[in-house]
């Protein structure tokens, strides 16, 4: 029982980190990245390639390149790969395509990704995927299975906390406000001096890097990664978590990830078997879909809605009432002028 | 890297730094041969005019005359088919809106120019150019880096709000305000950006009369204080009170330019309004 | 060269299946502005309804008609009682996409639960191969082709010669203007969803026929091809959708020969992306709308 619980914990951490990245792009900035799962996959594949070691003719799986570096390098490489992919996809898609077209192109890019990887066995071992991905420090630490899992959970949590702090700082800063302005009204944001395409590109890069980290954490835990695990509905599962939990705030999104990823998608490990795996899978997705519809109808702001940012009172502007507007421009120019 | 960039290394614009507009005699805004074509329609046809700093100019004409188009082309939202827009010596034609804004030329919107789910104060703070903490590294550096600068701007924003009689709404979501109040928020926001000139697209449209008067007073005070205004407006009475000079457009072309009183009796102006579509 | 020509034949058959689907999808978008991701799943559902009918002894053609009717009714009801309430509430475009994705999942997995994960097929028609020049078709494929042509003609007739059709075009062009000239947008929307549901249902059966297999996931890949066809011709343009269907259909089959079967859908995807990047308004969209800009 312990074992399953630990496994679920790691999955939940992965889900939370992935949702945080998506929240940065979609929840805060309003970028509909329907290809999000692709970034998670890039991270997973990168981490695998950086720890599997070079491909030899004796290997039973094919991949185009590999090396064996110690932790945390595979994870950092994964983050970098996610960021680079974010840059490329952002440059390709965000350049002034209308919002709904952007979303369609991203969806198609995601599907193309699974297709291309599946179709070319020499690239990343095709549809079978990569396996036997080594776990960090596993050989050095001589502990039980449960002991190692605990250690890995620790690694994941520490990584997640670092990512959390970075995202939290962004969220609460003037930059966070800029992101939300872009989300609320792109045109007005431009008119007021914000370089909207550059901002969107920025969140594609950072969000992509975060997604990739989540993929890296997941792949070195499971030890395997195949296209079947990153089809485009997976992106939808993450969107669902962000919507249900409450977009725009990290805590809400984490809750959503816990509810959706943890309970719905992985929690079946804890439930008694009531049918064949297909039936269970079908019921899972249907329940998720029903949950989404319910939330979209009854509580679109999510369980924990985004909080209003209030500024504390200071003495400034305590003058009230219909003052003549004289001196307005002087005040506007401020003390520095 | 420069604090004002969101993406490191990104220059503000390819153009040179602007010359301060206080040189006497130099117009702040000079539009030359501005033409805007959509598909087969010529929305603006060879429009040219100059605006001296510290003046308020009205752009009037019947519906479909192309006034909004001209404003949008100056502000950068619409790309002109040909022509130049010199603001403070820099040709802004064809550049996206944020470039115009960075040069001090701010445009307000006809409809919904506010950020609904940001508070009034946040709406104003957004407009502050080069605020610490708006770049990625600034944000990651934490509150210790940008906190004080933000506090100062909050104080300035509250001053502006109190003079617009919106101080008590500073922590409300902008979308919860009335239409007229939202227009005032937009004007307040435009001011936070320390603009040299404002392009106002029907600031009084759909606003209750008392609030419209309030907006008018605010604009007049701004003009008196040296801000340059170019506004598109249908409320001719307000235009007459506010603007030293009006430019009349009809069917994409300029047909008159001068003081409102004089133009009232000019034949082309009357026929444009009476016979225009 | 022979295989290229024979693929052309297959391409036209694929295009015939795509045509009603793409037109249906486009009608829904132009009438209500909704990108209905559940369209593929709806097609699959109808295809299985037809399967059920054939299992009960009905001929495949009767089954197709019934499936079409089923599709029409469920589609209109769906729009009236699920999608419209959401749009009336002010749900954004993205919100509606999420709603339709959720719907797609519900329908698709409901189909799986009902009929199982394994593919089934319609009873084989009397076999027989017809040769037209270098191209060869089975009898079913020929019928599919014929049905496709019928749909093309019928669509054109509907849009140009009936009052309802003209109203649909009016609403698609400018919803508000149409409403102010007395056209009941609600009725037209219902009609649009009825027609598109009918075409989607029929397309589902046609797809099952041309693939010789009906499975709960068949709507997935096909949906992308539908979207590719619809976007290629110009989102919201029905004639464009028909042209797009022809182009994508032929492209799919030709690229299957040239690139290998696994890569065929990728060509459709690549076309879609290219079109969206270079000319998002599609081939037939003509000059960009001048209204609403000045």
Image (cartoon, helix red, strand yellow):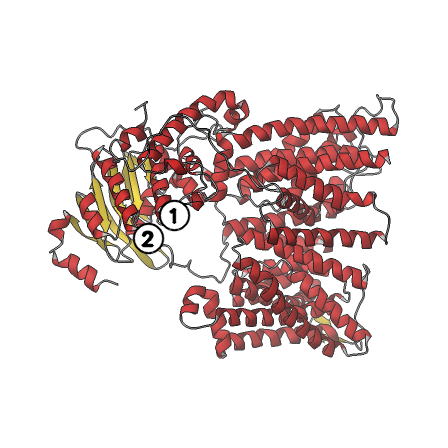
Tell whether B75 sits left or right of C277.
left
Chain for numbered disc 1: B
**Secondary element type, mark 2:** loop
- Determine which quarter of the picture holds residue A266: top right
Residue C174 visible to an observer of this rendering: no
**Secondary element type, mark 1:** loop
Tell whether B211 sits left or right of C114.
left
- Residue tagged 2: B206
Q: Residue at x 29, y 54 (%)?
A: B66
Relative to C263, is B98 above or below?
above
Please provide percent x and percent y for residue B181: 36, 44
Chain for numbered disc 2: B
- Determine which quarter of the picture holds residue A42: top right
Q: Residue at x 52, y 72 (%)?
A: C187
Q: Say yes or no: labels 2 and 1 on the same chain.
A: yes
Say few, some or many: other residues with alpha carbon within 10 Å of mark 2 (under 14 / 14 to 19 / 20 or more).
Answer: few
Please provide percent x and percent y for residue B133: 48, 27
Tell whether A197 sits left or right of C126.
left
Q: Nearer the viewer, residue C45 or C145?
A: C45
- Residue tagged 1: B178
Q: Which mark is residue A96?
A: none
How many circles with numbers are drawn on the protein? 2
Q: Nearer the viewer, residue B232 or C8?
A: B232
Please provide percent x and percent y for residue A312: 46, 29
Pointer 2 or 1: first along the chain: 1
């Amino acid at each position: 029982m312990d074992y399953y619980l630990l496994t679920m914990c790691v999955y939940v951490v992965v889900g939370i980190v992935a949702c945080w990245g998506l929240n940065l792009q979609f929840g805060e900035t309003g970028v509909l990245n329907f290809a999000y799962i692709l970034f998670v996959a890039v991270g997973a594949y990168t981490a695998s390639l950086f720890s599997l070691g070079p491909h030899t003719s004796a290997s039973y799986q094919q991949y185009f390149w590999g090396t064996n570096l110690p932790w945390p390098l595979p994870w950092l490489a994964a983050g970098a790969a996610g960021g680079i992919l974010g840059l490329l996809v952002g440059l390709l898609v965000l350049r002034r395509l209308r919002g709904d077209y952007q979303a369609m192109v991203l969806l198609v890019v995601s599907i193309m990704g699974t297709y291309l990887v599946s179709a070319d066995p020499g690239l990343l071992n095709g549809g079978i995927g990569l396996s036997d991905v080594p776990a960090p420090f596993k050989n050095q630490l001589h502990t039980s299975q449960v002991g190692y899992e605990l250690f890995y959970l620790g690694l994941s949590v520490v990584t997640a906390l670092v990512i959390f702090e970075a995202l939290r700082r962004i969220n609460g800063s003037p930059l966070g406000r800029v992101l939300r302005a872009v989300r609320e009204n792109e045109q007005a944001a431009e008119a007021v001096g914000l370089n909207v395409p550059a901002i969107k590109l920025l969140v594609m890069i950072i969000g992509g890097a975060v997604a990739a980290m989540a993929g890296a954490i997941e792949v070195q835990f499971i030890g395997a990664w195949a296209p079947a695990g990153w089809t485009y509905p997976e992106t939808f599962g993450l969107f669902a978590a962000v919507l249900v939990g409450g977009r725009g705030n990290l805590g809400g999104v984490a809750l959503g990830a816990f509810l959706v990823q943890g309970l719905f998608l992985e929690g079946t490990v804890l439930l008694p078997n009531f049918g064949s795996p297909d039936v269970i899978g079908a019921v899972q997705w249907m329940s998720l879909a029903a949950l989404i519809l319910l939330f979209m109808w009854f509580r679109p702001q999510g369980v924990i809605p985004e909080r209003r940012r209030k500024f504390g009172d200071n003495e400034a502007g305590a003058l009230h009432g219909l003052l003549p507007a004289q001196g307005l421009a002087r005040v506007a120019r401020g003390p520095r002028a | 890297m420069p604090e004002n960039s969101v993406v490191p290394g990104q220059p503000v614009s390819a153009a040179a730094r602007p010359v301060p507009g206080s040189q006497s005699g130099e117009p702040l805004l000079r539009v030359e041969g501005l033409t805007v074509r959509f598909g087969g329609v010529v929305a603006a046809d060879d429009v040219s005019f100059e605006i001296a700093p510290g003046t308020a100019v009205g752009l009037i004409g019947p519906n479909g005359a192309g006034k909004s188009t001209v404003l949008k082309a100056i502000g950068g939202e619409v790309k002109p088919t040909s022509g130049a827009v010199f603001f403070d010596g820099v040709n802004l034609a064809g550049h996206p809106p944020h470039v115009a804004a960075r040069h001090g030329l701010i445009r307000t919107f006809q409809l919904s120019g506010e950020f609904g789910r940001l508070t009034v104060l946040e709406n104003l703070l957004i407009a502050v150019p080069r605020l610490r903490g708006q770049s990625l590294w600034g944000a990651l550096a934490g509150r210790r880096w940008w906190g004080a600068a933000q506090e100062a701007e909050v104080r300035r924003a509250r001053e502006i709000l109190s003079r617009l009689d919106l101080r008590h709404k500073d922590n409300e979501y902008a979308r919860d305000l009335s239409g007229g109040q939202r227009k005032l928020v937009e004007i307040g926001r435009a001011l936070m950006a320390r603009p040299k000139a404002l392009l106002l697209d029907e600031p009084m449209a759909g606003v209750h009369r008392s609030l419209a008067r309030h907006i008018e007073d605010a604009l007049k005070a701004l003009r008196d204080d040296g801000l340059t205004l170019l506004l598109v407006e249908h409320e001719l009475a307000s235009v007459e009170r506010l603007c030293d000079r009006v430019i009349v457009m009809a069917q994409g072309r300029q047909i008159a330019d001068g003081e409102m009183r004089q133009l009232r009796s000019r034949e082309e102006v009357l026929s444009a309004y009476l016979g225009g579509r | 060269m022979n295989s290229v020509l024979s693929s052309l034949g297959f391409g036209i058959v694929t295009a015939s299946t795509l045509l009603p689907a793409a037109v249906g999808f486009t009608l829904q978008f132009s009438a209500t502005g909704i990108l209905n991701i559940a369209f593929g799943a709806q097609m699959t559902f109808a295809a299985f309804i037809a399967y059920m009918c054939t299992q009960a002894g009905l001929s495949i053609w009767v089954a197709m008609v019934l499936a079409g009717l089923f599709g029409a009714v469920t589609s209109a009801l769906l729009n009236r009682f699920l999608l419209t309430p959401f749009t009336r509430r002010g749900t954004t475009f993205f919100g509606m996409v999420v709603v339709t994705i959720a719907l797609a999942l519900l329908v698709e997995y409901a189909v799986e639960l009902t009929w199982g994960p394994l593919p089934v097929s319609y009873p084989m028609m009397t076999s027989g191969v017809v040769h037209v020049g270098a191209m060869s078709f089975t009898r079913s494929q020929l019928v599919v082709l014929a049905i496709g042509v019928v749909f093309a003609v019928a669509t054109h007739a509907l849009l140009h010669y009936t009052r309802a059709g003209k109203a649909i075009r009016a609403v698609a062009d400018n919803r508000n203007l149409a409403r102010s000239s007395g056209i009941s947008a609600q009725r037209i929307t219902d009609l649009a969803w009825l027609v598109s549901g009918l075409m989607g249902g029929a397309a589902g059966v046609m797809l099952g026929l041309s693939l010789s297999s009906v499975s709960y996931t068949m709507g997935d890949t096909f949906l992308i091809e539908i979207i590719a066809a619809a976007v290629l011709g110009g989102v919201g343009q029905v004639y464009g959708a028909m042209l797009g269907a022809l182009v994508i259909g032929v492209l799919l089959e030709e690229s299957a020969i040239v690139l290998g079967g696994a890569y065929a859908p990728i060509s459709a995807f690549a076309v879609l992306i290219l079109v969206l990047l270079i000319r998002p308004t599609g081939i037939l969209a003509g000059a960009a709308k001048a209204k609403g800009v000045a």
